[in-house]
Image (cartoon, helix red, strand yellow):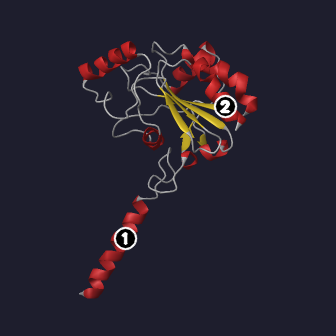
């Protein structure tokens, strides 16, 4: 009887260990205390998997994007930032998301058309993901924990966005949830500093922060 209980206990431990070390497209180890931004990966619109470890030593700007949003023209500003600073160590990563009024409904080809043809985007763009809720990419769970929501710089626009969430019962106006498309996370070269910028902060407003991190 004791031997049987011991075997059951061993199986339970093995199952627990397996469940804590999964790889699910966007996270290599979702429970490790040593988890960092470099623990994650992304799958591009072309289906290529990229480990964020490959960007260790670069300043990273992560943005959730959409093709049919009032903030969509920020693609142009993001591309300008990328062209200006990519040779100095900046990488920008776009993550299309359809969770905000269905403003990214397209296929990978349609998203690529918007990014590449209309706005001339050359930085890596991910396959479509969720950034909030039960199916959110673990990368975003990590980012929101490390750089919580600190309020809107433009309270009028913020109230409008929160009103949309309350009307549609999304729950996205609560806690550290991503509030809308084009929320930005700026990450230092060593991955230890993560700063969050809300949607209404234009790409060009990040220049001084980017230059500071590039100089470190």
In space, the residues marked 2 and 1 are separated at their CA atoms by 46 Å
Numbered circle sitting on residue 26: none
Res 50 → quadrant: top right
- Closer-to-camera residue (13/38): 38
- Closer-to-camera residue (173/96): 173
The residue located at (38%, 16%) in the rendering is 155
For the N terminus, the image quarter is bottom left
Q: Position of residue 17 (x, y in %)?
A: 42, 65
Disc with the residue nearer the chain's start (2 vs 1): 1
Q: Is residue 191 above or below residue 100?
A: below
Where disc 2 sits, the SS reads helix
Residue under pointer 1:
13
The residue located at (41%, 23%) in the rendering is 180
Give the side of residue 201 with respect to residue 50, left or right.
left
For this orientation, the residue located farthest to the right is: 87
For the C terminus, the image quarter is top right
Task: Say few, some or many: other residues with alpha carbon within 10 Å of mark 1 (under 14 / 14 to 19 / 20 or more).
Answer: few
Residue under pointer 2:
212
Task: Say few, some or many: other residues with alpha carbon within 10 Å of mark 2 (under 14 / 14 to 19 / 20 or more).
Answer: few
- Closer-to-camera residue (137/8): 137
Q: Position of residue 5 (x, y in %)?
A: 27, 81
Give the side of residue 116 with respect to residue 105, left or right.
right
The residue located at (47%, 17%) in the rendering is 200
Where disc 1 sits, the SS reads helix
């Amino acid at each position: 009887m004791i031997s049987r209980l011991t075997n059951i206990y061993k199986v339970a431990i093995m199952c627990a260990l397996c469940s804590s070390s999964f790889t699910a497209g966007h996270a290599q180890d979702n429970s490790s205390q040593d988890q960092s931004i470099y623990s994650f990966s992304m799958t591009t619109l072309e289906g290529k998997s990229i480990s964020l470890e490959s960007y260790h030593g670069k300043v990273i700007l992560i943005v959730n994007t959409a093709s049919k949003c009032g903030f969509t023209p920020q693609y142009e500003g993001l591309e300008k930032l990328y062209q200006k600073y990519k040779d100095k160590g900046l990488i920008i990563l776009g993550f299309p998301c359809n969770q905000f009024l269905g403003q990214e409904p397209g296929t990978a080809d349609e998203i690529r058309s918007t990014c590449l043809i209309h706005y001339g985007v050359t930085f890596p763009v991910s396959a479509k993901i969720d950034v909030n809720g039960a199916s959110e990419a673990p990368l975003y769970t990590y980012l929101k924990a490390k750089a919580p929501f600190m309020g809107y710089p433009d309270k009028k626009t913020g109230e409008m966005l929160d009103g949309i969430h309350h009307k549609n019962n999304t729950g996205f106006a609560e806690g550290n949830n991503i509030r809308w498309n084009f929320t930005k996370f700026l990450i230092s070269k060593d991955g230890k500093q993560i700063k969050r910028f809300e949607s209404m902060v234009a790409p060009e407003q990040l220049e001084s922060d980017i230059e500071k991190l590039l100089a470190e």
